[in-house]
């Protein structure tokens, strides 16, 4: 049997259970079924999910604005531990469970365990990534330093003093941290053995650089809405999808699930009954690897991140929405026009904003810089420029992933 078909057939029973539960508890999900002309009995298997239109991140954002804070997608009897605000903004509820985002299995596949002392370089401020991996490390009984992205000198000192053995965070930040280690001449004192990286692509050139300094580098893939979706095994070829989520690769036109190696959008359905994550379109592009993995795991593999569909882009591990950029930058008095430019230099995302003044240009760059930092949570270089061409793009991504 096709490994994708086998994986999805094994999860058929999850569909009927979650659809029935959500239809009885969740107003937003009932509305989706009604809008699609469906009854709960129409969705009993993974294959049946094709009948329900994919819901996009932008649509969730609109739903939350229309019916704050969760767009009607939170069930009546939900019990939450935390709520996060991701760029957009989009609010993500965390269920009151151990390892609620299910990353412990991904970390275990990368060799993380009770003997590790882990530096977690994902942010703990508003967005969920830091807490996601914090919970996973607790489930594995690993000791954790909640570092976030901060002062590299202090983090290097902590690595030396505490004997940090493992890293979790964006690959670009691991590179910056190791470069600082080399600048300080303290390489011999580092005990870092393994790293689990996510939030941005890991091109071969960056993996090679990191692998010369850290013995084991594994990458994983997930989203703020759905948590762990896929992760590498020791073969380091493709990422096994999580066996506790229904992951599909769907045709970009029809939305139908694909079972061959054609590129499509990654779409996820969770068995959560407290919050409706059903046929959620991540906006990420990938494709299946159909060969059986030598590691023996039965779940199929995604090839990895292959780009984005839709307007939003991921920058430094967080989404940047053109509509949000428009609202923030146009909201600064004295801005007549602008364009946002994203580039990648030495494996690090760089964000620049060019603004055209409307009258007095004094302090305009500073005001826009503050607005972007406060409204978008990105550090950004702002320059004041002459009028842009009338047909100039307002959102330009120059990055390549070589």
Image (tube, rainbow, N blue to C red):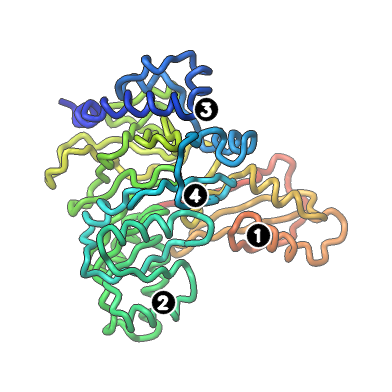
The answer, for residue 88, to whether it is visible in the render is yes
Dot in front, 4 or 1:
1
- The residue wearing badge 2 is 155
Would you say 293 lies left or right of 70 here? left
List the single residue furthest toward the right.
Answer: 359
Dot in front, 3 or 2:
3
The answer to which of marks 2 and 4 sits earlier in the sequence is 2
Mark 1, secondary structure of its residue: helix
The answer to which of marks 1 and 3 sits earlier in the sequence is 3
- Residue 368 image point, x, y percent: 72, 59
Mark 3, secondary structure of its residue: helix
- Residue 147 image point, x, y percent: 43, 70
Mark 2, secondary structure of its residue: helix
How busy is the neighbourhood of tag 2: few (under 14 within 10 Å), some, or many (20 plus)?
Answer: many
The answer to which of marks 1 and 2 sits earlier in the sequence is 2
Q: Which residue occupies 50% across, 36% down?
A: 74
For the residue pair 294 and 48, the one nearer the viewer reads as 48
For the residue pair 382 and 101, the one nearer the viewer reads as 101
- The residue wearing badge 4 is 314
- Residue 46 image point, x, y percent: 31, 24
- The residue wearing badge 3 is 27
Quadrant showing the N terminus: top left
Q: CA distance from mark 2 to mark 4?
A: 25 Å
Q: Which mark is residue 273?
A: none
CB atoms of marks 1 and 2 within 8 Å: no
Quadrant housing residue 265: top left
- The residue wearing badge 1 is 374
Q: CA distance from mark 1 to mark 2?
A: 25 Å
The answer to which of marks 3 and 2 sits earlier in the sequence is 3
């Amino acid at each position: 049997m096709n490994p994708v078909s086998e994986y999805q057939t094994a999860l058929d029973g999850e569909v009927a259970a979650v659809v029935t539960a959500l239809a009885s508890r969740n107003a937003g999900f009932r509305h989706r079924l009604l809008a699609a002309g469906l009854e709960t009995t129409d969705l009993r298997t993974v294959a049946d999910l094709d009948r329900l239109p994919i819901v996009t991140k932008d649509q969730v954002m609109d739903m939350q604005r229309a019916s704050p804070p969760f767009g009607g997608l939170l069930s009546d009897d939900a019990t939450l531990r935390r709520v996060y605000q991701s760029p957009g903004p989009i609010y993500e509820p965390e269920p009151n469970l151990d390892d609620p985002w299910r990353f412990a299995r991904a970390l275990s596949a990368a060799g993380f365990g009770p003997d590790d002392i882990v530096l977690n370089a994902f942010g703990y401020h508003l967005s969920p990534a830091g807490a996601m991996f914090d919970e996973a490390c607790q489930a594995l009984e690993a000791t954790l330093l909640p570092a976030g992205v901060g002062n590299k000198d202090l983090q290097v000192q902590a690595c030396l003093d505490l004997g940090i053995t493992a890293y979790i965070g964006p690959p670009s930040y691991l590179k910056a941290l190791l470069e600082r280690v080399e600048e300080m001449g303290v390489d011999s004192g580092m005990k870092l053995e393994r790293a689990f990286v996510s939030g941005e692509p890991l091109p071969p050139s960056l993996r090679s650089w990191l692998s010369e300094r850290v013995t084991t580098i594994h990458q994983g893939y997930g989203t703020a809405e759905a948590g762990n979706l896929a992760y590498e095994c020791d073969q380091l070829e493709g990422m096994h999808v999580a066996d506790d989520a229904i992951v599909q690769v769907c045709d970009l036109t029809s939305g139908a699930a694909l079972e061959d190696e054609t590129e499509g959008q990654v779409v996820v359905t969770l068995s959560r009954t407290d919050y409706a994550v059903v046929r959620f379109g991540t906006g990420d592009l990938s494709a299946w690897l159909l060969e059986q993995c030598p590691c023996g795991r039965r779940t199929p593999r995604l090839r990895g991140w292959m780009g984005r569909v839709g307007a939003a882009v991921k920058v430094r591990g967080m989404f940047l929405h053109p509509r949000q950029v428009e609202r923030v930058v146009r909201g600064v008095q004295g801005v007549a026009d602008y364009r946002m430019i994203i580039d990648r230099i030495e494996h690090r995302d760089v964000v620049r904003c060019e603004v055209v003044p409307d009258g007095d240009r004094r302090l305009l760059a500073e005001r826009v810089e503050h607005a972007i930092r406060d409204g978008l949570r990105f550090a950004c270089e702002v320059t004041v420029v002459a009028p842009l061409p009338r047909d100039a793009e307002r959102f330009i991504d120059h990055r390549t992933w070589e």
